[in-house]
Image: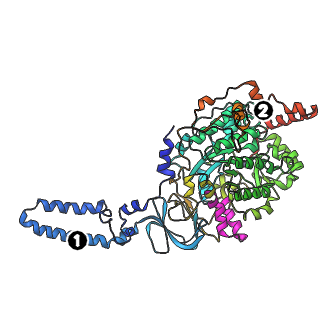
Amino acid sequence: MPGIGNERVISHGMVPFPSSHEYTLKPRCFSSCGGDNSGCRFAVIDPLDHAIAYPLVLYIHSAPEFLMRIRLFCALASYSILLAFWLCGISQTEAQEYDVVILNGRVMDPETDFDEVANIGIQGGWITKITKDPISGKQTINATGHVVAAGFIDTEQHGLTDWGIKVNLRDGVTTQMDFEVGALNISQWYAKRDGKLQANFGTVVGQEFSRMRVHDGLKLEGPDVSMPFFFDFRAEAAKDGVDGWSVTRSTTEQMNKISATLDEGLREGALGVGSTIGYAQHGITTYEMLEAQRAAARYGRLTAVHHRFHPSASTPTEGPTGANEIIVNAMLLDAPLQIHHNNDYGWWEIEEKTQLAREKGYNIWSTWYPWDAGSGNAGASILAPATWETSMGYKYEETIYDPQNDKYLTKDEFLKLAKEDPGYMLVAFSPPRKEWLKEWIKLPHFVVAGDGMPTVNSKGEQLTWDSPFEDYAGHPRSSGSHAKVLRLGREANVPLMHTLSQLSYWTAKHLGDTGIKAMQVRGRMQEGKIADIVVFDPQTVKENSEYAAGKNGLPSSGLPHVLVFGQIVVSDSKVLKGVTPGQPIRFAVEEKGRFVPATKEMWLKTFTIDSGGVAPRKNAAPNLPASEDQSKLTPKQNLSEQFWWGDHQRLNDFAGYCCEYHQLQARFAAMEQRRTLSPQE
Ligand SMILES: [Zn+2]
């Protein structure tokens, strides 16, 4: 629907900062006119002032002439008195100049390195004043002894329910987005949430959902094809015994359908493409992944990826091999890339590569969460002995924790559980993470993303806004990741400015650089930026969530006040029910999509000398400009083309290169893959 997004964006996500002109003409702006009042005198008279002056003028006109002069005199005198009162009332007027003021806090801004005790004036959702002078407003927050920083920005929140948003607000997170699973039907997704959420929200368009449509036949209509309903869709996809989205390779036509769905989401304003190729490493070919990243690149937007082979520690499937694939694509396409939760084996290599890429000017970065355990269901293949024991070298009794019973499982107990209740959620410790955590808090541009899980109780039922924090049953990273990073940083003497960059600024910077205007004015404590703000005590702030049942969802402490778009949503450590200032973070809807199907003909024309004798183009992508009539480019499918692109159902590489024994092994592995749902990270 062309046009819808534009209006939304202008009215919410990207409200322009009032220009100096607009600001001068605002009612009650007297003190903002620099005191000389020039060109501003009448503009400052608000309706109340007019209501007093206007009856006086009427009275003068209706009076007999002989009284008129006297009355005119009196009227003018009265008017002067009123004017004098009005002028004397400036301090009272000024008292209401700001909607909210935050006084005497240590204001910290990583972008400008500003770090001083100051007062903040907020008006209309924006930071309009940062000053040492006394100011006042309709609402006052005393931030003495506290840090006043930009609200935290999280791109991996999969628990986007009222409860999940609430517990994250207690953790200082003012922008909660899902860049991994993402959504479909983007216009509807945003429309349903507009004006109803307590934190800012945004999404990418999901590759996994796009594959479910093609390979599992799911229709996936409506505004809720996203978290928190994601696992329902996975279950539906698996009903026929095959997770098509995960294991089925695409023909050219199917690949183009998937890319077209991604393009439609981008056209409707999605922030980029979200990929879970790590859960679909048998299904998504390298060329399909290149095409997915290209779909986003056509808009200059990011692809955010849970990459292939994550978190394998065994060559030739080491985790960084999967990262290489997406880094190379991003660099060659000159497209932004976010690598999800790079907190496992090989993180050092991936961080080195992202730093080297950034040095060359590429907008590539990664995320992490501060926990030494992940979570997964008992039936997940990663927890099976072949991976967990043989490949990773872990012992069950030291690493596999049952949160409901607050104990570690022996191998026998685990195997029994995996057989009887494969959906049972377990906490899986990764022992090396304890040491790695000490380094992660010191890495530049390594941004914090909680990877918050579905917000359910121990029976798997969704929590509501009013559900007690104790009811949440899942990984504690859903509730305490950001405060935990602040605590870890404090204990290790990491400069607070660096930690704040990991929590908000670098995410805002990298996303802003992809063209998201709403992110260019967030993550910063500066005049003229949006007032998403967290007020916290740097000495006491900490997470309270733990792995043990009943403590998974305990909210963080030491962050008493949180503002979203200039409105107080957390006051004295209480989330205010019904206050929903959350803004949509999105791109405007575009009239036309930019998708160009991949075809053999176009590839040959682009990369060989077959098109009129020109040499193969350097840096070419088999693309045509979006302005060209795409109807002419509809691929004419034929057998040879499908085969040529690599129709893997026909081109059976195992048949060509493997012995009988290995073919059987491969088939068994595929059956195994289909039998178990993919693990949750
Ligand atoms: Zn993930």
Picture coordinates of residue 656, whole percent (x, y): 89, 31
Picture coordinates of residue 648, whole percent (x, y): 79, 31
Compare residues 382 and 406 and report the one nearer the observer.
382
Picture coordinates of residue 557, whole percent (x, y): 63, 64
For residue 80, which numbered disc appears in the image? 1
The residue located at (51%, 57%) in the rendering is 565
The residue located at (60%, 39%) in the rendering is 625
Give the extent of the magenta segment. Answer: 481-508
Confirm whether the magenta stretch covers residue 246. no
Q: Residues within 10 Å of mark 1 (few under 14, many from 20)?
A: few
Compare residues 31 and 413 and report the one nearer the observer.
31
- Predominant secondary structure, magenta span: helix
Residue found farthest to the front: 613
- For label 2, the residue is 646
Q: Secondary structure at mark 1?
A: helix
Q: Is residue 7 above or below residue 149?
A: above
Say whether mark 2 is within 8 Å of ligand 1.
Answer: no
The disc labelled 2 sits on which kind of residue?
Gly
Q: Residues within 10 Å of mark 2 (few under 14, many from 20)?
A: some
The residue located at (75%, 57%) in the rendering is 351
Confirm whether the magenta stretch covers residue 492. yes
Residue found farthest to the left: 66
